[in-house]
Amino acid sequence: MIRNASRLAATSVALFMLASPAFAQQAQQPSASHLAAGRDVAISSGMTGAFDAMTGPLLNQLQQMNVTRPEIRQDLEQVVAILRPEVDQKKQEMIDSTARIFTTRMTEAELKEVAAFYKSPVGQKYVLIQPGVLDDVVRDLSIWSQRTSEFIMDRARQEMSKRGHQLN
């Protein structure tokens, strides 16, 4: 029992020592220019459009309450007008968070190179067509997944049959 506890302690120390550079690296704050490059990539890549796609409908849904309660229409419109800048600030927080995430995975020079791509004509086209491409990929993935599942089961049945087993 003591031997197991010693092994556990030794393993814990070893893991801590191996992980220490990672913790030190995470604790290190990126420079302002590195963060700016990460922010540039987040925005120019179109990634932040997803934030708009989430917050816009929420505000619109709030504003649609006036359909069921017309007596609050004017007050509700004023509240939504007050909330829009606050919601935009929340969106900016998410953009900043995304920028920090990028800085943990890419150097400032790499981020600047990526941002330059997204600002180029072909990069802008990529951002423009990406939602449609993703829709098509998801559709095709669903079909492929079903076909692959059927293939696997058919082949497994064949192979198991050769071994004298029947799969249902």
Image (cartoon, rainbow, N blue to C red):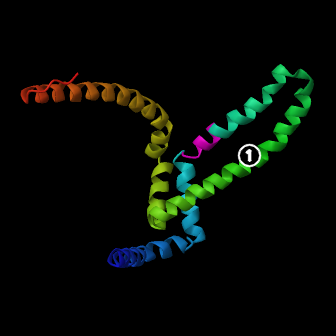
Q: Nearer the viewer, residue 13 or 50?
A: 13
Q: Which residues are magenta?
A: 47-53
Q: Is residue 118 above or below residue 71?
A: below
Residue drawn at x 7%, y 27% is 162
Residue drawn at x 74%, y 31% is 60
Count residues near mark 1 (Cα–Cα under 10 Å), then give few for <14, some for 14-19, many for 20+.
some
Q: Percent position (x, y) of residue 4?
A: 34, 74
Q: Is residue 123 above or below residue 103?
A: above
Q: Percent position (x, y) of residue 73?
A: 88, 27
Q: Is residue 53 left or right of residue 19?
A: right
**Mark 1 — residue?**
87
Q: Is residue 63 left or right of residue 101?
A: right
51 part of magenta stretch = yes
Residue drawn at x 71%, y 35% is 58
Which residue type carries mark 1?
A: Val
Q: Quadrant of the C terminus?
A: top left
35 part of magenta stretch = no
Quarter of the rendering containing residue 81: top right
